[in-house]
Image: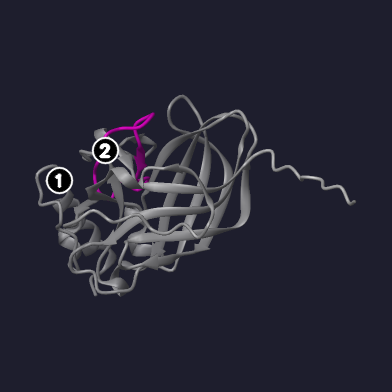
C-alpha cells in the first residue's frame, strides 16, 4: 500500500495528461487513475418495478463515464468528486421515490460495486447546483451487474412542489485500495437542458474544477449523465367512492 504522499504525487503526474490519456485507464495502480473511463457497450434499460417514470436519460447513455466518489479513507480525500445533472419539474410537481444511475467499474477494479452512496437533489442557481433540497447520505445501493444500473429506493420521498429546474447528484462511497479501482457514472449525449456539472474540491485530478463546473470544461467530452427518476406526479389525490 502506497503512502498518502506517494499516492498524491503519482495521481498529480498522471492526471496532467487526462485529456489525451486512454479513456479506460482506471485500475489498481494509483498512478494510472483518471476521472474518466469507458466501457464497451451501452447498458439496456432496467425494469422499473412498477413506478411511474418521471424523467429519464438512460436511453442516451454514452460509452464514457465520469468518476464521482466519496472515498472512505483519508488518503482518497483529494479525489472526492461529485457529478450532477439537471431535470425540469412541471407545474404539478413531483414526488421522487426511486433514482437509478447507469454506472460501471473501471478496468482492473476487483471489488463489488459500492453498496452505499450519497444522493442529493439541489435547487438551480444560475445554471449550476445551488441549495440542497433533498439529501440522502449513505443511501443503500442495489446494483445490477447485467444492466449496469445502480438503483436507490429513497428512505423518504423527495417532494418537489415548486416547478422549475433541479439537479440530481450521485456519489458512491468506497475505499479505492479495497476495491482495487474506481467506479464511474455513465455520461450522456446529446445534451438535454443545461450542461452537466462536476466538481473535485481537493483538485486531486488537477482539472481546476474545485467548484461546480460544466463537464465540458473539466476534460469530459460528453455533456450530461445517464439517470432515471421515478415516483408520482403531485398532487397525489384520493378518489372517493360512493356506497350503494
Name the quadrant of the N terminus. Answer: bottom left
Q: Is residue 109 magenta?
A: no
Q: Residue drawn 14% across and 42% down? A: 19
Q: Specify the quadrant of the image occupied by residue 225.
A: top left
User: Sequence-wise, which precedes: disc 2 or disc 1?
Assistant: 1
**Magenta residues, as a range?**
190-207
Q: Residue drawn 26% across and 69% down? A: 3
Q: Position of residue 222 (x, y in %)?
A: 24, 39
The reply, left or right, for residue 152 in relation to residue 227 is: right
Q: Is residue 206 magenta?
A: yes
How many discs appear? 2
Mark 1 secondary-structure assignment: loop
Neighbour class for label 1 at 10 Å: few (<14), some, many (≥20)? some
- Furthest toward the right, the residue is 244
Q: Nearer the viewer, residue 131 or 208?
A: 131
Which residue in the protein does label 1 denote? 16
Q: Residue drawn 15% across and 46% down? A: 18
Which numbered tag is attached to residue 189? 2
Q: Position of residue 166 (x, y in %)?
A: 51, 35
Amino acid at each position: 500500500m502506497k503512502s498518502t504522499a506517494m499516492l498524491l504525487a503519482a495521481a498529480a503526474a498522471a492526471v496532467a495528461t487526462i485529456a489525451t490519456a486512454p479513456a479506460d485507464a482506471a485500475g489498481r495502480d494509483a498512478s494510472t487513475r483518471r476521472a474518466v473511463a469507458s466501457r464497451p457497450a451501452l447498458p439496456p434499460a432496467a425494469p422499473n418495478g412498477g413506478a411511474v417514470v418521471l424523467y429519464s436519460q438512460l436511453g442516451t447513455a454514452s460509452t464514457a463515464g465520469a468518476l464521482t466518489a466519496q472515498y472512505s479513507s483519508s488518503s482518497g480525500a483529494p479525489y472526492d468528486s461529485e457529478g450532477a445533472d439537471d431535470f425540469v419539474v412541471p407545474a404539478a410537481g413531483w414526488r421522487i421515490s426511486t433514482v437509478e444511475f447507469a454506472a460501471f467499474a473501471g478496468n482492473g477494479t476487483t471489488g463489488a460495486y459500492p453498496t452505499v452512496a450519497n444522493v442529493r437533489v439541489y435547487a438551480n442557481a444560475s445554471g449550476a447546483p445551488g441549495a440542497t433540497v433533498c439529501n440522502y447520505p449513505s443511501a443503500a445501493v442495489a446494483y445490477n451487474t447485467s444492466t449496469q444500473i445502480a438503483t436507490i429506493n429513497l428512505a423518504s420521498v423527495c417532494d418537489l412542489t415548486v416547478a422549475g429546474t433541479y439537479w440530481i447528484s450521485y456519489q458512491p462511497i468506497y475505499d479505492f485500495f479495497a476495491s482495487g479501482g474506481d467506479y464511474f457514472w455513465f455520461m450522456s449525449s446529446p445534451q438535454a437542458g443545461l450542461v452537466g456539472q462536476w466538481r473535485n474540491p481537493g483538485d486531486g485530478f488537477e482539472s481546476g474544477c474545485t467548484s461546480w463546473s460544466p463537464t465540458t470544461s473539466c476534460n469530459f467530452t460528453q455533456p450530461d449523465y445517464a439517470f432515471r427518476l421515478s415516483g408520482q406526479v403531485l398532487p397525489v389525490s384520493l378518489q372517493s367512492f360512493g356506497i350503494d
